Image (cartoon, helix red, strand yellow):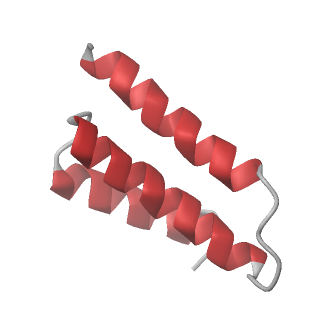
């Protein structure tokens, strides 16, 4: 697959988790943080981004969205 498709899949995964309801007993902020870092980990594993880029983008999204 091309890198662009893999990046879109990572973004789709993160958005799907972000907008899905959080499990009972888990704070919505914790679920959103999980969504951000699950998408980052997926991007690294499938080769859409290197680990440094994925970590910096995930941290920026977490801070700018008010999750952290």
State the residue at coordinates (75%, 82%).
27
Q: Is residue 61 above or below residue 28?
A: above
Q: How many marks?
A: 0
Return the x and y of residue 26 as percentages of the image width and height.
Answer: 74, 82
Q: Is residue 66 visible?
A: no
| 28 on left or right of 47 | right
Return the x and y of residue 31 as percentages of the image width and height.
Answer: 66, 70
Q: Is residue 43 above or below residue 52?
A: above
Q: Quadrant of the C terminus?
A: bottom right
Q: Residue furthest top?
A: 2
Q: Is residue 49 visible?
A: yes
| 29 on left or right of 63 | right
Q: Quadrant of the N terminus?
A: top left
State the residue at coordinates (33%, 55%).
41
Q: Residue furthest bottom?
A: 25
Q: Residue furthest front?
A: 24
State the residue at coordinates (16%, 46%).
50
Q: Quadrant of residue 23?
A: bottom right
Q: Is residue 15 above or below residue 6?
A: below
| 48 on left or right of 59 | left
Return the x and y of residue 45 as percentages of the image width and height.
Answer: 24, 45
State the residue at coordinates (51%, 59%).
36
Return the x and y of residue 8 as percentages of the image width and height.
Answer: 46, 26
């Amino acid at each position: 697959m091309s890198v662009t498709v893999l990046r879109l899949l990572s973004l789709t995964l993160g958005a799907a988790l972000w907008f899905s309801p959080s499990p009972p007993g888990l704070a919505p902020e914790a679920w959103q943080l999980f969504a951000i870092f699950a998408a980052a980990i997926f991007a690294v594993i499938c080769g859409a981004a290197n680990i440094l880029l994925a970590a910096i983008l995930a941290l920026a999204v977490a801070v700018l969205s008010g999750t952290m």
